Amino acid sequence: MGSKLHLTLTNELREFIDRNCGDGTLYATPGEFVRDLLRQKKLQLESAAARNAILEGYRDAIAGRVVPFNGDLNSLLTKAK
């Protein structure tokens, strides 16, 4: 079972949640809506971190900060899954 979090919301935020929950929406309850928003934000942050790491790698390569790799990249990538 998960833990509980109690929030105080502005009227504007509560109205936003209410408009996106219930009949005719994707979410049956406010809790489902908020949990999905949190999951989306978590994924967004993780994706941004991965993108930044890739860009840092490209910057290192452009600057000549590289280390020779003599292994099998395909095997390495397969193991990472």
Image (cartoon, rainbow, N blue to C red):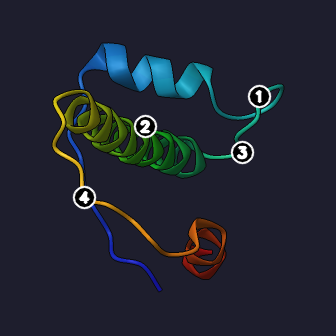
Distance Cα–Cα, label 4 vs label 1: 52 Å
Asked if residue 15 is positioned above or below residue 60 in the image, the reply reads above
Query: Foreground mark, 4 or 3?
Result: 4
Image mark for residue 67: 4
| Residue marked by disc 2 | 44
- Report the residue marked by disc 3: 28
Q: Quadrant of residue 51?
A: top left
Label 3 crowd bin: few (<14), some (14–19), many (20+), radius 10 Å: few
Q: Secondary structure at mark 3?
A: loop
- Circles 2, 3 touching at the beta carbon (< 8 Å): no
Q: Residue at x 39, y 25 (%)?
A: 14
Residue 66: where, in percent of width, then height? 23, 49
Read off the residue under disc 1: 25
Mark 4 vs 1: CB contact within 8 A: no
The span from disc 1 to disc 3 (Cα, nearest Å) is: 7 Å
Label whose residue precedes the other's in the sequence (1 or 2): 1
Nearer to the camera, 70 or 42: 70
Of circles 1 and 2, the one toward us is: 2
Q: Quadrant of the C terminus?
A: bottom right
First in sequence: mark 4 vs mark 1: 1
The quarter of the displayed image where residue 2 is located: bottom left
What is the three-letter code of the residue carrying label 1? Thr
Comparing labels 2 and 3, the label whose residue is closer to the camera: 2
Q: Quadrant of residue 33?
A: top right
Query: Given this view, does label 2 or label 4 mark the residue nearer the observer?
Result: 4
- Count residues near mark 2 (Cα–Cα under 10 Å), then give few for <14, some for 14-19, many for 20+: few
Which residue lies at the image location 64% right of the left edge and 77% below the top edge? 75
